Image (spheres, rainbow, N blue to C red):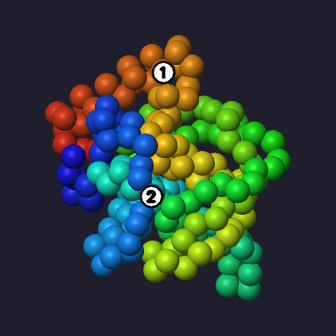
Amino acid sequence: MTTNKGSLVLYPDEMLNKICEPVGELTEEVQEFASNLIVTMYQFGALGIAAPQMGKPIRMLAINALEPISPENKNGDKRKAILFVNPEITETSGVKVKSQEACLSIPGIMVNLSCRYNNIIVHATDEYGKGFTTQLNGQDAVAFQHEMNHLDGVTLLDIVGKVQKKLVLKQYKRSMTKWVTSRVMPQV
């Protein structure tokens, strides 16, 4: 589906259930797609986005991560985009936390989950092929794990229980019906 902000794949599109392939050569086309991924994340005000949500079944995602507290970020509320190519969670720690999650591909819904680790260590490469390892905590860790699910063909609706799924689908259908009649995209 194309909106005025970018191109998103919406549930129940089959793209969302595909296991994504590793990114091979980092061509100009792949780098341009990476840039578009980040722009679209910002345009929709999202905490993260994965390549299949924009129609590419490749292992690439971005999150809008909190920057560490510093003299320039005194309140600890500044964010920056981090792009992950072929990401892997190499370590999990802490407890699984309760989270409220929304999804760009299932707009207008919010789901309560308790399946995400509070602390993770991730290894990936950037869009230029440089490898890096980073630790993500709290909301950043939750957002990353949400986007990793997309790379594995898993949506929020695949994680929730049957009763919650039924309620969420009902809410989603109402939200999308409003969107079709008003042409105003539901809030994420």
- Which image quadrant for residue 161? top right
Check the image and name the residue furthest to the top.
163
Residue 72 image point, x, y percent: 67, 84
Quadrant of the image for the C terminus? top left
Write the residue at 38% across / 40% down.
18
Q: CA distance from mark 1 to mark 2?
A: 30 Å
Q: Which mark is residue 22?
A: 2
Q: Which mark is residue 13?
A: none
Q: Is residue 106 visible?
A: no
Check the image and name the residue furthest to the right.
94
Q: Amino acid at mark 2?
A: Pro
Write the residue at 42% across / 63% down.
23
Q: Amino acid at mark 1?
A: Lys
Q: Secondary structure at mark 1?
A: helix
Q: Which mark is residue 165?
A: 1
Write the residue at 27% across / 59% down.
5
| Left or right position of 36 against 114 | left
| Left or right position of 30 against 72 | left
